[in-house]
Amino acid sequence: MHAYLVILLLSLSIGLQPVSTDLYLPALPGLALDLHASVGMVQYTLTGLLLAFGISQLLWGPFSDKVGRRPIMLFGLALYLVAAIGCVLSTSIEMLIVWRVVQGAAMGAVITSARAVVRDLYQPLEGARIMSKAMTGLGAMACTSPPIGGFLSQHWGWQVALMSVVVYAAATLALVAWKFEETVSTRNPDALHLPTMLRIWWQVLCHPTFRAFALLSVAAYGALFTYLATSSFVFIQVLHLTGLELGWILSSMSLVYITGTLVCRYLLRHIGMRKTIAWAGGSSAFSGLCLCALVYTDHATATALVLAMYPMILAHGIHQPIGQSGAVGPFPLSAGAASAMNGFLMMLAAFATGAWLGRSIDGTLFPLAHGVAFWGVVLALTAWTLVQWHGEPHTTD
């Protein structure tokens, strides 16, 4: 497959995540009203999807090592399409939760296989460049999904907004079935054998290169999740912005993220991977410290907070493509399992961060500042130590 086709397929596949969440969020008020659901029950449609997405990856990764990426991606997209249709046709909140859980499990199959494709085809450094280009497309979807979802749900209702997810899934399934060629050259027939799975997972977790890049991915996602989980509360309830103003802020963040993926490719080409990650780690820590300074000195206006967040969002466009490609780098024959473990750890960090925020949100801006600062410092320390020591992987299988 040509590199441009790989990038397009990757963008559409990993783009299922923002399409499944960001496009869905503006439809929640109308959905809750029509299905006579409480806010708590509606939240289960999001947490259920993320939980199924995180756990299912542990199975889909070894499965794709055994049978190949193409069949798992086709099955996952077909199942996702069925679940998306089920969401549109749901007549109760309980039914919708069930279909969202199925949707999350199917999304795990597609995204885990897509990440592993990068290692099947490219060495880690080139894989980081390819993943960065794919994540530029992901950023475009994250930028356009909220306004599209808001426009459709406002004018035609939440079912029409969710129908756009059906159209997206159908188009992606058609393109993968038509153009995607198998990328696994040597299958592992024992990948689903439980002792083999446990051995591979242990081997992955013990590898210093995996730990370095996985921690990079986890911390970057933790910082982003902190921002996403608190943004509506901070900007609407604390700083009294309108929903439209928050929408513009979210779109601007997505544009900064896209810029980060472009900066990533430029820096990789001119200063190399280690220096690129070191620079991005410093940018993340700087963002967290600026937020703390604004909050503690009582200068935290909406504009100041947004400007302070930009360095972290920009760095996210560097951390994620390099972290995700680097984590699977040492495992050319077990890329699915390594991709799955990395994705599972990222979702685990999101749940831990969400649980902490649930106890910490207190009507102030401190949870946002403390959360981003914590993950920013973790990112900087990881980028300046572990990645510098173990950034050039040696293969183990």
Image (cartoon, rainbow, N blue to C red):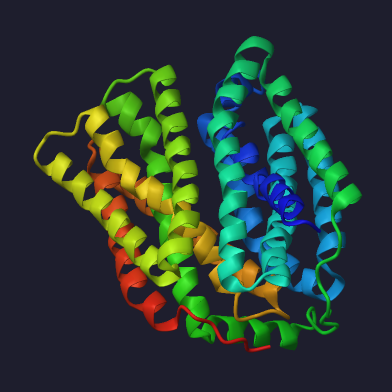
145 with respect to 319 (left or right): right
Q: Is 386 or 164 nearer to us in this picture?
A: 386
Q: Is 290 or 318 nearer to us in this picture?
A: 318
Residue shown at 76%/27% (left/top)? 163
Above or below 28: residue 353: below
Residue shown at 32%/28% (left/top)? 235
* Quadrant of the rendered image containing residue 228: top left
Q: Is 277 or 23 nearer to us in this picture?
A: 277
Above or below 91: residue 255: below
Judged from this view, the residue extending furthest toward the right is 178
Task: Please indicate, yes or no, whether residue 199 appears anywhere in the rendered image.
Answer: yes
* Quadrant of the rendered image containing residue 227: top left
Judged from this view, the residue extending furthest toward the left is 297
323 with respect to 137 (left or right): left
Picture quarter with the C terminus: bottom right
Residue shown at 73%/43% (left/top)? 98
Above or below 2: residue 126: below
Residue 65 % position (x, y): 78, 74
Residue 205 % position (x, y): 54, 81
Residue shown at 86%/71% (left/top)? 67
393 with respect to 123 (left or right): left
Judged from this view, the residue extending furthest toward the front is 270
Above or below 119: residue 321: above
Q: Is 239 or 207 nearer to us in this picture?
A: 207
